[in-house]
Amino acid sequence: MRKNFLTCLALLMATVLFAKKVEITKFRCVTPIEVIRPFMIDSVNAGQKAFSDEMLLDSYTSLANISAGTEYDITGIPKSSADYSINLISFNMENRDFVKGKLSVKGLKNYRIYVDGKKSDGKEIALEPATHTFVIKYLSKKSVADSLSVDFDTDNPEDIIIGTSVKRMYTINSVVDGKRVSSVSISPSGKYIIISYLNTLEGGTLQRRFIAKEVASGKIISQGSEEMIWMPSSDIYYTLRKGDNGRDIVVFNPQNGSERIFAYAIPEGRFQISPNEEYLLYSIEQEGPKEKKEIYQVLEPDDRQPGWRNRNSLFKYDIKSRIMQPLTYGYRNVWASDISRDGRYILLMMSKARLTKRPTTLFSLLRLDTRNMKVDTLVEDDGFISNACFSPDGKSVAITGSPEAFAGIGKNLPEGKIPNMFDMQLYIMDIASKSVRAMTKEFNPSVGNISWSTKDGKIYFTAENRDYISMYSMTPVTGKIDALNLNEEIIKSFSLADKANMAVYFGQSASNSDRVYLYDCKSGKSTLMDDISREILDGIKLGECHNWNFVNSRGDTIYGRYYLPPSFDKKKSYPMIVNYYGGCSPTSRNFESRYPHHAYAAMGYVVYVLQPSGATGFGQEFSSRHVNTAGEGVADDIIEGTKQFVKEHSYVDSKKIGCIGASYGGFMTQYLQTKTDIFACAISHAGISDHTSYWGEGYWGYSYSEVSMANSYPWQDVDLYVKQSPLYNAEKINTPILFLHGDVDKNVPVGESIQMFTALKLLGKETAMVLVNGQDHHITEYNKRLMWQNTIYAWFAKWLKDKPLWWNEIYLPKKL
């Protein structure tokens, strides 16, 4: 009996050991590279070391060569007939969860291991979720027969896939590394375009690049790191260079490659060249009065912001006379919105504070005649306008603003409802009569950037269109709006040619990165000019993204979309992550966002993104639901949508659903947990826990409350500010919540997370808090962003996959 027991125990132990060992039997290999022993001048080198065959491994060999190799079984790896050869063999390891293990190489005497290009001893390998490349570089001898075996020992063999494919997972490094488009511009004739790029190297180093292309041929005519900007009236671009006496404006002619100095020794500062190319318009910042460092007075709430006391004024630098003179003078902030085509008039905007009434910041729009310095006030003290541009003839002005601008002529809401101030409308003013027309009152998308074409007289603009950013043209006389059939879901930027019916734009979609297009405004045809996405996604495996909408209990259609894992199998059960904002804007279809949805999906999650009530881009009535609700109704949309999605998609594990949101979305995360227990875990980044403390302490607390809590204040609406705050409902929360926050956040102060974390700790609830040192509202520093993102991944893995290894690796359990 004892013998049988010991036999069974030995078999069981062997089974366990075998289950932890993953044998690698296929490799990608390149042809062995012959190396030779050096001529022995001396018996030792300068470091007093005697030569050994192992030193031949120091011969430089690019590991990138392995990608061009051929797949072989372990027994068929090519052999060399040379006396000595360097061999490169490789395999991939894909892990959708954090794993640790040891790589064991047997049968070789002289070898080195590289994991993702970095040398490793193979003994303690920690792998974040990704497709990792293992390379074994070894020295073979003609006289020695190698017998190779490679194993990876791990406690989690079920979490890894071994292969030799060049395909790889989409990860956070796919999001932050590599080249992206920064801006595009088209020359006045439409014959040339300039594309600017920003390339992020591994580690966070940034490189800027500018390329000028000929449209017809696609030929690159110039490129470099110096910024290139088109001159206003000709197909000549300029750049700034340091000359003998200061900065010079150097212009280049792409047709013949010639260059010349346009302006010598210009003043320092930000400027734009007037359309008639006669002067430079400068915006110069003047420092405000200083306070003592030891003790200082705060004049008003915004005075806590660094630089708030500084003011901008405008100056004109005449190219011919080389004289610079002030166009404005005073202590109010002034900036230029546009310059008329003949250079004569400048559209000025200026602001002033009025804290006692909403809106607390008022704007005025002025037309300044640069010839005689006369000023025509077009709009005075309207806190709801935001930007403006001239018509080509200078007789009209296109103005963007909220529905309440111009005494509410653009408002399209039932009586008593307050519009969302971020739901932007388009207005046109006739300068002579000062009459204003509301052009988008019946138009649901929220207007973004505008440009008035000198060629066809139409106004072109981008707009939030549900969770898309689409582009439109408007005929000013009739008000007719046409949607442009462009090739991307998110139009990031566009540029119109002054003398041709041409434009250039770039954008991305839910499943691709940046692409640049030439657009024929007459035919409506787009032509691809540069596909950055192809480079970024080369070899990447992406899952599918689909739209999914539902009708809520109030009868509204709530729009959304979902992402599936790359190797999706509808017969399997998947955990799900729900992402939302819940504030004044939609969670757009940006491919590379703060929460890159495809990266979550690559780890084996279904990701559901929805646009609850209150978001702009769906019409004024829908966006007005953000005002004076503090999550009421919005939370219902998220809860109903999550339940309905799970009901209609059987592959989602209803017990393993997590949720995440940032800023107002972080508030929604907290608020949701006071309303439901459907989430297995939650993450609140920079979330508001107490509307009263955020209102008073955040740099933009009281001013954002003009949008979200319009005409409501803590001392007059306790129900809204207190009863709707998660902090005062903390005892209702049963969901494990992770609080993430930059510890110098000026928008939503870190105290918002601290006080909620403290409350849950005192209540004995499951919670955690991670602060990011030196980061503000957005986590932007390269390495800190990676650590922040890994914290998110690890929290979800712990609660949605029951795999706490990664979390415990980052945040070692401590007994205190």
Image (cartoon, grey):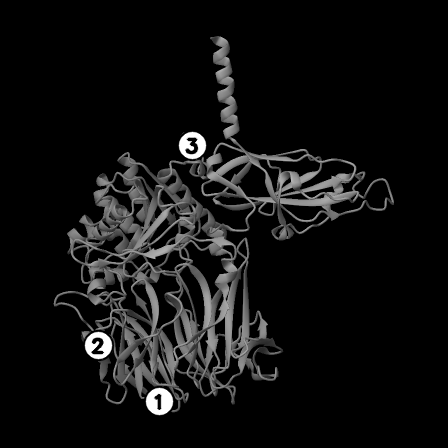
In this rendered view, identify the residue nearer to me: 390 or 456: 456
Quarter of the C terminus within the rendering? top left
- Identify which residue, 218 or 76, lies in the foreground: 76
* Residue 505 in view: yes
| Residue 115, horizontal then vertical, whole percent | 58, 44
Looking at the image, which residue is at 46% across and 47% down? 787
151 left or right, relative to 648:
right
Tag shown at residue 393:
1
Few, some or many C-alpha atoms within 10 Å of disc 3 (few <14, some 14-19, many ≥20)?
A: few
Q: Earlier in the sequence, mark 1 or mark 3?
A: 1
> Residue 178 location, x and y as percent?
52, 59
The answer to whether 598 appears left or right of 20 in the picture is: left
Give the number of the disc on residue 240: none
Q: Is residue 118 above or below residue 443?
A: above
Q: Which residue is mark 3?
A: 814
Q: Residue 806's quadrant in the figure?
A: top left
Residue type, numbered disc 2 = Phe
x and y, in percent, of residue 185 in the image: 47, 76
| Mark 2 nearby-residue class (10 Å; few <14, some 14–19, many ≥20) | many
Real-space Cα separation, disc 2 to disc 3, in angstroms:
60 Å
Looking at marks 2 and 3 on the same chain, the residue that comes earlier in the sequence is marked by 2
Q: Is 402 drawn above or below residue 697 in the view shown? A: below
The alpha-carbon separation of the residues under discs 1 and 3 comes to 71 Å
The relative height of residue 308 versus residue 522 in the rendered view (above or below) is above
Nearer-N-terminus badge (1/2): 1
| Residue 423 in the figure: left or right of residue 185 | left
Choose top left, top right, bottom left or bottom right for residue 795.
Answer: top left
Left or right of 590? Residue 423 is left
Q: Residue at x 62, y 37 (%)?
A: 121
| Tag shown at residue 406 | 2
